Image (cartoon, rainbow, N blue to C red):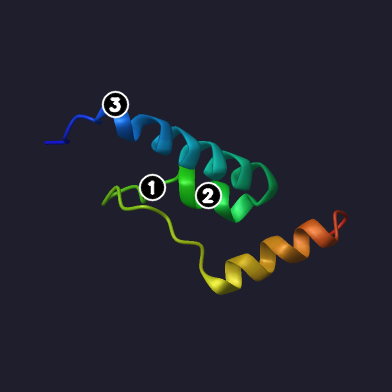
Amino acid sequence: MAQPVRPEDQEALLEEALLVADACRDDPCAFFEFALVEERTQSPIVVAPHQRVMVDFLLAHPRAV
């Protein structure tokens, strides 16, 4: 069971969440890792290096198919 967040920790957690949200706006891989979980195990998604290369390529070449 999760522990309740202490009031003195709330501000630090909010600041961290805002930093993550900011990174997610600029980096699709950061967004995938933040927002998605594996369907069966509910484990967080980790973008593999070859997937990051693909995303970088698609962002650099918007007309790529």
Amino acid carrying label 1: it is: Val
Q: Position of residue 41 (x, y in %)?
A: 26, 52
Q: Secondary structure at mark 3?
A: helix
Under mark 2, the amino acid is Phe
Question: Which of disc 2 and disc 1 is earlier in sequence?
Answer: 2
**Residues at marks 1 and 3 touching, judged by CB atoms closer than 8 Å:** no
The label number, if any, that marks residue 17 in the structure image: none
Residue placed at 34% from the left, 47% from the top?
39
In the image, 43: left or right of 17? left
Q: Quadrant of the C terminus?
A: bottom right
Look at discs 2 and 3 and give the one toward the viewer.
3
Question: Which residue is depicted at the point 85% across and 54% down?
Answer: 62
Which mark is nearer the camera, 1 or 3? Answer: 3
Q: Is residue 34 left or right of residue 62?
A: left
Outermost residue to the front: 8
In depth, the one of 22 and 64 nearer the eye is 22
Disc 2 target residue:
32
> Mark 3 packing: few (<14 Cα in 10 Å), some, or many (20+)?
few
Q: Quadrant of residue 7?
A: top left
Look at mark 3 in the image and give the residue it sits on.
7
- Drawn side of residue 3 relative to residue 52, left or right: left
Residue drawn at 25 percent across, 31 percent down: 5
Q: Give the CA distance from mark 2 to mark 3.
A: 29 Å
For disc 1, the neighbor class at 10 Å (few under 14, some 14 to 19, many from 20) is: some
In this figure, what is the number of numbered marks? 3
Give the amino acid at mark 3. Answer: Pro
Disc 1 marks which residue?
37
Residue 55 in view here: yes
